[in-house]
Amino acid sequence: PLIASDRAMAEEYLVIPDLIRPLTEKHWPGALTVVGKVGRALASGAVRSDGTVALRVSSHPVAKALAAGLGRPIVATSANVSGLSSCYSIRTFLKQIHDAKHPEPDFVIDVGPIPRRKPSTLVAVVNGKVAVLRQGTVKV
């Protein structure tokens, strides 16, 4: 997903569906990711072929500061090799990608150990209703 520094940035880059707006008001910043139509233009790799994007406002101070400093959302991925268990420290992450013979990232920021928790809850409007695409920390 993309990480915005605050609600204003999120609303600039994501058309927040009216049905989902109350959830964002309650859970942003936090572990709620919204899928919706892209607002302001983004790099083609950040936007799905159907013109949607997944975006959230993080509560993590480093993620917020990076997005704020760049003046646009940052791309964030989970800190693990796809299909393998989540990593909660930089040491575990680097060992996992090494053991999996996965290409190492060009750049990693070590913010220290992160708390063990579920991923963000992923929501979208499907057929006129709020759909939970992935149940995570936020209960919908």
Image: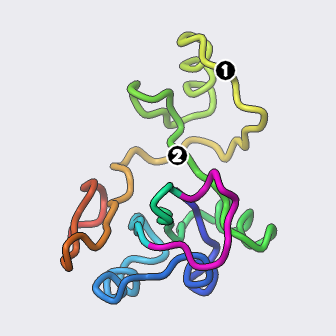
Q: Earlier in the sequence, mark 1 or mark 2?
A: 1
Residue 103 image label: 1
- Left or right of 66, for residue 139: left
The picture places residue 100, in percent across and down from the top left corner, at 53, 12
Main secondary structure along the magenta-highlighted residues: loop
Tell me: residue 7, above or below residue 108. below
Mark 1: amino acid: Pro
Please, what secondary structure does the residue beneath circle 2 have?
Answer: loop
Give the residue drawn at x 53%, y 71%. 57
Please, what secondary structure does the residue beneath circle 1 have?
Answer: loop
Q: What coloring was used for the rendering?
A: rainbow
Residue at the farthest front position: 50
Q: Residues within 10 Å of mark 1 (few under 14, many from 20)?
A: few
* Viewer-nearest of discs 1 and 2: 1
- Looking at this view, is 23 or 51 the one in front? 51
Give the residue drawn at x 67%, y 47%. 111
Magenta-colored span? 37-47
Q: Residues within 10 Å of mark 2 (few under 14, many from 20)?
A: few
Quarter of the picture holding the C terminus: bottom left
Mark 2: amino acid: Ile
Q: State which quadrant residue 32 falls in.
A: bottom left
- Residue that mark 2 sits on: 114
Give the residue drawn at x 34%, y 89%. 18
Image label count: 2
The picture places residue 55, in percent across and down from the top left corner, at 50, 66
The picture places residue 105, in percent across and down from the top left corner, at 71, 31
Give the residue drawn at x 67%, y 20%. 103
Residue 15 is covered by the magenta coloring: no
**Are dots 1 and 2 in contact, CB under 8 Å?**
no
- Left or right of 129, for residue 107: right
